[in-house]
C-alpha cells in the first residue's frame, strides 16, 4: 500500500488501516468524550456503542429515514452518513442533550402533550431536526414545518400531531420573545 499520492510530499499523508482503531474526542451534549473506533465506523454506531448515547437510532443506514439525526457543530446531520473519525474535535448534540437536568425540554413536552409519538423509534431524530429548525425559523407556517418534516419517515403518527407540537413551541417561544422585548423596552424607558 502506497503512503503517497501523486503530487503530495513523501511523509505528509497518513494511511488508515482497516484493522487499526483511532481515538476520537468530541464534545457530546456539552461534555468532552473520547473513545476508540475503527476507521469505517459510522458516527451513529460510535455514539450508541462507544459513548452510550442510545437515543440516536439507526434505521435505514442510507440517510433517508432521519432516525439517526443529530446536530454536528449546531447543524442537523444524519449520523449514519458520517464516519466517527470525521467527528473528531467537533460538537455533537443528541436527543439526550435536549432536556434540562430535571424534566423535559419545551419541544419534548410539546411532543408529549400533542401525542406526537407512538412507537418512538423515529422521535429522537425528528426532535433533533425540529430543535435545529426552530433555532433558525422562529415563526414557521404549517406548510414550512411539513416541508421540514418531509426528510423523516414515521409510520405511526401521520405527522399531524408532530406539526401541532412544533407550531405550539414556535408560538410559545414567540410570545416569550415578545414579553422579553417589552420588558427590556420598559426598563430602557425608566
Image: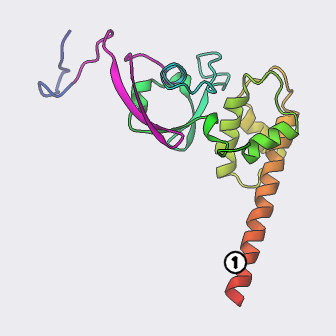
Compared to residue 69, the image places residue 49 above or below, namely: above
The magenta segment: 14-43
Q: How is the image coloured?
A: rainbow
The magenta stretch spans residue 21: yes
Quadrant of the image containing the N terminus = top left
Query: What SS does tag 1 mark?
Result: helix
Compared to residue 73, the image places residue 24 above or below, namely: above
Image position, residue 74 (x, y; %): 54, 44
Image position, residue 188 (x, y; %): 67, 85
Q: Quadrant of residue 64?
A: top right
Q: Is residue 129 left or right of residue 144?
A: left
The answer to whether residue 91 of the structure is visible from this angle is: yes
Residue indicated by mark 1: 184
The number of callouts visible is 1
Residue in view at x 61 percent, y 40 percent: 97
The magenta stretch spans residue 142: no
Q: Is residue 120 left or right of residue 17?
A: right
The answer to whether residue 141 of the structure is visible from this angle is: no
Amino acid at each position: 500500500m502506497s503512503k503517497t499520492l501523486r503530487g503530495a510530499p513523501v511523509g505528509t499523508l497518513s494511511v488508515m488501516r482497516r484493522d487499526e482503531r483511532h481515538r476520537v474526542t468530541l464534545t457530546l451534549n456539552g461534555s468532552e468524550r473520547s473513545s476508540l473506533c475503527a476507521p469505517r465506523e459510522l458516527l451513529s454506531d460510535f455514539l450508541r456503542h462507544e459513548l452510550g448515547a442510545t437515543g440516536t437510532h439507526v434505521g435505514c443506514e442510507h440517510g433517508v429515514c432521519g432516525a439517526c439525526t443529530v446536530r454536528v457543530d449546531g447543524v442537523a446531520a444524519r449520523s449514519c452518513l458520517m464516519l466517527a473519525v470525521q467527528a473528531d474535535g467537533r460538537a455533537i448534540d443528541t436527543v439526550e442533550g435536549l432536556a434540562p437536568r430535571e424534566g423535559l425540554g419545551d419541544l419534548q413536552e410539546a411532543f408529549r402533550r400533542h401525542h406526537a409519538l407512538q412507537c418512538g423509534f423515529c422521535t429522537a431524530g425528528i426532535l433533533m431536526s425540529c430543535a435545529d429548525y426552530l433555532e433558525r425559523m422562529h415563526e414557521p407556517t404549517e406548510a414550512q414545518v411539513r416541508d421540514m418534516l418531509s426528510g423523516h419517515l414515521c409510520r405511526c403518527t401521520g405527522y399531524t400531531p408532530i406539526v401541532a407540537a412544533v407550531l405550539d413551541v414556535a408560538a410559545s417561544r414567540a410570545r416569550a420573545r415578545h414579553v422579553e422585548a417589552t420588558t427590556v423596552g420598559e426598563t430602557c424607558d425608566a
